[in-house]
Image (tube, grey):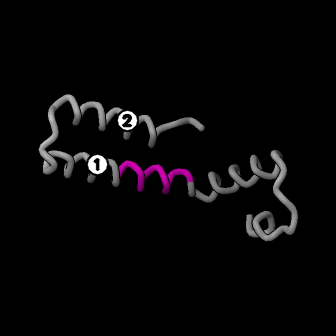
Amino acid sequence: LAALYHRDQALSGTDLVHAAELIDIAGGRAWSQTQVDDLLAQAMRQLPTACPTAQAVAELGALARLATHRDN
């Protein structure tokens, strides 16, 4: 992975796929998702302190989950 990042030329599509695979194998994707889940849970716990409406809480929660659990 380090060799890919330190190349002088731009990464090709194949290189990017390979880099993503290496990150996944190293546990980076799982670690990142755990971090996202923890931060989202913290944010959702803090949201009521802003005194939003129930609808706003639901909509913000849905938007946050959509943004943090995308496939691409």
The disc placed on residue 17 is: none
- What residue did someone put label 2 on? 63
Residue visible at 15% across and 45% down?
A: 48
Q: Amino acid at mark 1?
A: Ala
How far apart, in angstroms, are the residues tagged by discs 1 and 2?
Answer: 13 Å
* 32 magenta-colored: yes
- The image position of residue 38, as x and y in percent, is 34, 53
- The image position of residue 21, as x and y in percent, is 70, 50
Residue visible at 27% across and 51% down?
A: 43
Give the overall secondary structure of the magenta segment: helix
Few, some or many residues within 10 Å of mark 2 (<14, 14–19, 20+): few
Q: Do residues under tags 1 and 2 come within 8 Å of each other at their CB atoms?
A: no
Q: Is residue 19 left or right of residue 62?
A: right
- What residue did someone put label 1 on? 41
Where does the magenta region start and end? 29-38
Q: Amino acid at mark 2?
A: Leu
Location of the C terminus by quadrant is top right
**In this orientation, which residue lies closer to the viewer: 26 or 12?**
12
The mark that comes first in sequence, 1 or 2, is 1
- The image position of residue 64, as x and y in percent, is 37, 40
* 5 magenta-colored: no
Front: mark 1 or 2: 2
Location of the N terminus by quadrant is bottom right
